[in-house]
Image: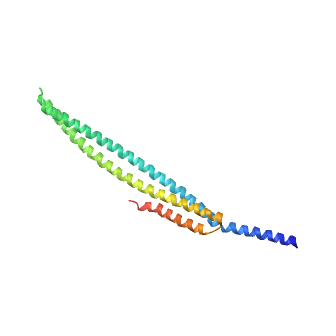
Amino acid sequence: MEEMEANEAQELKEHAEHGQESAMRPVAFTMSLLAVLVAVTTVLGHRSHTEAVLFQNRSTDLWNEYQARHIRAHNTELASDLLATLTVGDKAAAVKLEQKWKDGLAKSLQDQKEAQEQAKEFEGEVELAERRANRFDLAEALLEIGLVITSVTLLTRSRIYWYLGFFFSAGGIASGLSVLFVK
């Protein structure tokens, strides 16, 4: 009889443990889902940061082009002014050369203006990519916090941590989705 009661007690204990394991399956599933969301958000954040760097490099290149054109235009203007003040033996050739430089100067000033406009456009793209990256970074942090808090549920067997993990995770998801509305 005692042996029967010991076996029943063991069976009840095993049944209770199995019940606790099955009760924690939704928590484990939530943790798996959060881990995937963290990974996706991390990749998207890294891509946004990379995009910002590439746009910044392109903007810097255009500003360098702008500066080079500005220097070239200044040098052409100085040479043209110098040619206009010198006494030259072949006046027709000097006038022709001066006109060529003035035409080149006008083209250079137009190209300089275009480079400036393009550089400003890329600066806008840099700011947009950085705003997106910041949203993804916040989403990643909140999702990671949600994942860690949710995992505490497995240790404590208290579902309050699971619900708290949902709260942080929802914030992370909202931050990640808000990227769609960043302009």
In the picture as drawn, the residue positioned furthest to the top comes out as 89
* The quadrant where residue 15 appears: bottom right
> Residue 152's x, y, as percent?
62, 63
Compared to 82, does 9 lie above or below?
Answer: below
Compared to 172, does 109 lie above or below?
Answer: above
Residue 8 seen = yes
> Residue 163's x, y, as percent?
57, 68
> Residue 97's x, y, as percent?
17, 33
Residue 33 seen = no
In the picture as drawn, the residue positioned furthest to the bottom comes out as 1
> Residue 169's x, y, as percent?
53, 64
Compared to 60, does 5 lie above or below?
Answer: below
Viewer-proximal residue, 111 or 28?
A: 28
Seen at 32% across and 50% down, the residue is 120
Compared to 153, does 91 lie above or below?
Answer: above
In the picture as drawn, the residue positioned furthest to the front comes out as 156
Q: Quadrant of the C terminus?
A: bottom left
Seen at 41% across and 62% down, the residue is 181
50 relative to 1 in the view: left or right:
left
169 relative to 97 in the view: left or right:
right
Q: Quadrant of the N terminus?
A: bottom right
Seen at 72% across and 67% down, the residue is 18
Seen at 35% across and 46% down, the residue is 59
